[in-house]
Amino acid sequence: MSVVSKYNRISAVYDMMEAPVEIFLYGKWRKEALSNLKGRVLEVGVGTGRNLEYYPAGTQVTGIDNSKGMLDKARKKHKGRKNVTLLLMDAEHMDFPDNTFDYVVTTFVLCSIPDPVKALKEMRRVLKPSGELVAIEHMRSKSPLIARIEDLINPIMFFLIGDELTRNTVENIKKAGFTITEEQNLAFKDVFKKIRAKT
């Protein structure tokens, strides 16, 4: 089963599944990272629209996802928001011109895109020369003990939702040509990070 099929399958219960971590961890990270953005924002992997409430009213947000089920949930939750456009689109093949957006945002997305470096290169392409990537992601820890636990859990998570726990996301961002300007550990030592990067 493809990653898209898995997310379509769980879209109806996705918000409920993640409610505890959303309340105690993710929500405050989203608010801190997104509430000061300006201009044109592209959110890659918008999912059920968890981030949309945190963008300032003056931003023009375009959210893309390749799961119709997740996107349908986002559209229902945020119907009527005039500064938000939601599109069914693959992150590895975006239908936007070069130099379109002031910011590209990913939150817990680079773990499930089949070719994250290819997608990141697309994100870099559609960013303006002055643009910035803002990412909240989980990744493989440099701690041998934590990394071992991730290795054990990874096959289960990939089977259930197509989520790879062992990706070296910081290195992938660099491979795509970005220059990292901020790398902040958020939780579980270095598993969860906030990353900001320039083109």
Image: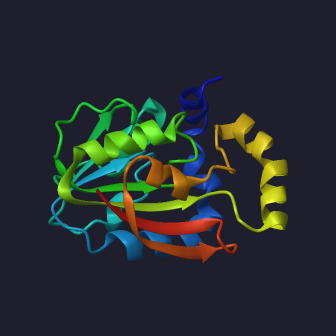
Q: Nearer the viewer, residue 109 or 143?
A: 143
Q: Quadrant of residue 83?
A: bottom left
| Residue under the image location 29 percent in, 36 percent down | 87
Residue 24 appearing in the image = no
| Residue under the image location 68 percent in, 75 percent down | 189
- Picture coordinates of residue 163 (x, y %)? 64, 43
Q: Nearer the viewer, residue 19 or 142?
A: 142
Q: Is residue 177 left or right of residue 24?
A: left
- Picture coordinates of residue 2 (x, y %)? 60, 25
Say how many tags the image has.
Answer: 0
- Picture coordinates of residue 74 (x, y %)? 39, 46
If the image is split into quadrants, where does the C terminus sit? bottom left
| Residue under the image location 16 percent in, 52 percent down | 82
Residue 177 appearing in the image = yes
Q: Is residue 148 left or right of residue 109?
A: right
User: In the rendered view, would you say 143 is above or below 113?
Assistant: below
User: In the rendered view, would you say 192 is above or below 157?
Assistant: below
